[in-house]
Amino acid sequence: MVVGEDAQVKGFSGARRAKQWLEGTMRIFGAYANTDSESCGRRLTLSWPYGGRTFSFDLGGAMRGDPYQNDMFCAEVKNYAQPSDQGTQFDEFLAKCYVAAQAQHHLSDHFMWITWAPFRANSWSTLDSPGQVETAVLQHSSRVFGTSDPEEARKLLDADLAQSVAARLWLIVLSDKQETLLPLKDWAAIVAAELTRREGSW
């Protein structure tokens, strides 16, 4: 198997495992991957404002329970064993989140970055800050604002929107052992049935 094919297989596996973990928390329902069907892919695909290109998130779905009842989310999944180039990819993810929020995309209540390998350890606590969002958007200003001029891009940047995006960010780090702590299938079935009963009575 060539490197590109191996990365694609790992990507599919990571998205499936992340979906299983999210649903196992019982706070996520109706989760789907962009590879599940053409319609799922369309729901998770957006266009950069400039440049004529599109991008897609790996997962999307709905949330249950306060304070997130009926909120929608989209997620990017990195099935990596090492930090690798996640920092660069994370910055692009933040720019994508900004574009999604600006377009009021229906899945933009929450943006999740799910990985098996932490990255940028020295600045981890600031990765979901408004300043980090602004920096990432400015790095990709040619696709977001149609200009690569720093001063012009800074004028076009919506600081309030960047702050809103930062507030919607989730950084989730999984591990192989952590995945084994999901509720057993029979337990999950009982809880799911009770949640369905309650939701039907609301």
Image (cartoon, rainbow, N blue to C red):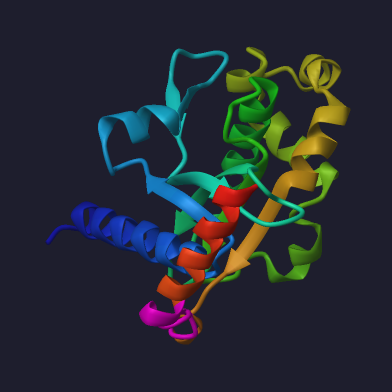
Q: Position of residue 97 (x, y in %)?
A: 63, 36
Q: Position of residue 40 (x, y in %)?
A: 35, 35
Q: Nearer the viewer, residue 56 or 137?
A: 56
Residue 13 is left or right of residue 91, and the answer is: left
Q: Quadrant of residue 162?
A: top right
> Which residues are the magenta region?
179-187
Q: Quadrant of residue 70?
A: top right
Q: Nearer the viewer, residue 162 or 189?
A: 189
The answer to whether 103 is drawn above or below residue 9 in the figure is above
> Count the marks: how many?
0
The residue lying furthest to the front in this view is 201
Q: Residue at x 63, y 46 (%)?
A: 111
Q: Nearer the viewer, residue 189 or 8?
A: 189
Q: Quadrant of the N terminus?
A: bottom left
Residue 173 part of the magenta-drawn span: no
Q: Can residue 79 be seen by looking at this rendering?
A: no
Q: Can residue 166 be seen by looking at this rendering?
A: yes
Q: Residue at x 67, y 64 (%)?
A: 120
Q: Residue at x 49, y 79 (%)?
A: 175
Q: Quadrant of residue 107?
A: top right
The answer to whether 138 is drawn above or below residue 165 in the figure is above
Residue 183 part of the magenta-drawn span: yes
The answer to whether 166 is drawn above or below residue 84 in the figure is above
Q: Position of residue 48 (x, y in %)?
A: 53, 20
Q: Position of residue 123 (x, y in %)?
A: 77, 63
